[in-house]
Image (spheres, rainbow, N blue to C red):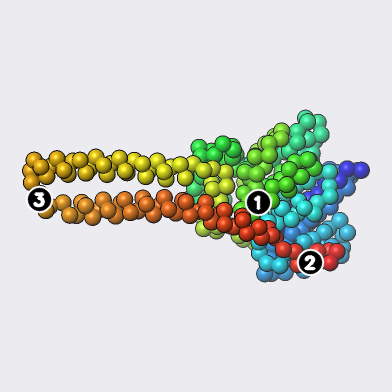
Amino acid sequence: MEKISVIVPCYNEQESLPIFYQEIEKTRKQDFPEIEFEYIFVDDGSKDKTLQQIKQLHQQDQKVRYISFSRNFGKEAAMLAGLDAATGDYITLMDADLQDPPHLLKQMYNTIKQEDYDCVATRRVTRKGEPAIRSLCARMFYKLINELSDVEMVDGARDYRLMTRQVAESIKSMREYNRYSKGLFTFVGFKTKWIEYENIKRIAGETKWSFWKLFKYAIEGITAFSTVPLVLSSIIGIVFCIISFLLILLIVIRTLVYGDPTSGWPSMICIIFFVSGVQLFSLGIIGQYLSKTYLEIKNRPIYIIKETEKI
């Protein structure tokens, strides 16, 4: 009998969990009567009663497994922990807020079985319900990262996907500390089909992704899959060196021809401030890459498990 592992990262999802469980069970019974399922809920250091909810589900249903972190390590770590624990022939990643519709699983499974795909991923074609500024920034981010990176990022891509065991093992083999899963899934390759659907609002609770968290996540994606910003800072430095050299020649010629007037201090101060800003910007880019390298060479664990259904 084939087996599907459903990995569900959870952070303060006590309101969503019971509803999610009912929906995924409904999908299992209707669409997968002859396939074994396991549900792996990863509690990412929740501060509410998420873990208690998961434990109750485990007592009611032995298909429910759980992993609880010692603290909040982030969704990327939670997804990796779920992949490490999954035992299924096929693995899917889903959010507990039902923004990833369970009914698509049947279509995803049939696509892999009948059309010889290794992975079926999902993408939102609309961002209905999101703030306009967030939607605009998201679209700009995908355009930017696709210009900077050799790895193509699909606009509106979700973490929700169904993959074969081979794809999951490939993702697990990359143990980098600074993780950006959307890029990692593209990096490993394999034959992938995209399913489009319209954005769905959360069934309960509030989003954990603030604008600042999304901004940091975007920086993570750019620095993880592109070194173009480093090249850009070098090019800017070269350009300003050339401009400075030309300005020196201009000042020397002007002094020889017209003397040495004392006017021009305001413009000089503005130029100094501008050049200093460019230097700090370039140093900031270099600092981002150095910080990622620093975190990687520490070789700290990506996550720490406090307890599971077996412990």
Q: Which part of the image, by quadrant, shows the N terminus?
A: top right
- Judging by the rendered image, the residue that carries numbered circle 3 is 261
Let me know if residue 198 appears in the view: no
Camera-near label (2 vs 1) is 1
Residue type at mark 3 is Pro
Mark 1 residue crowding within 10 angstroms, few (<14) / some (14–19) / many (20+):
some
Label 1, label 3: how far apart the Cα atoms are: 58 Å
Residue type at mark 2 is Glu
- Judging by the rendered image, the residue that carries numbered circle 2 is 307
Residue at 61% in and 55% down: 296
Q: Secondary structure at mark 1?
A: loop
Q: Where is residue 46 shown, x and y percent of the image?
A: 68, 66
Q: Where is residue 160 shown, x and y percent of the image?
A: 69, 46
Residue at 75% in and 41% down: 167
Label 3, label 2: how far apart the Cα atoms are: 75 Å
Give the answer, above or below, for where 57 lies relative to 249: below
- Is residue 24 found left or right of 212 in the rendered image? right
Residue type at mark 1 is Glu
- Judging by the rendered image, the residue that carries numbered circle 1 is 176
Dots 2, 1 in contact, CB < 8 A: no
- Is residue 68 found left or right of 273 in the rendered image? right
* Residue 206 picture quarter: bottom right
* Residue 163 picture quarter: top right
Q: Residue furthest left?
A: 258
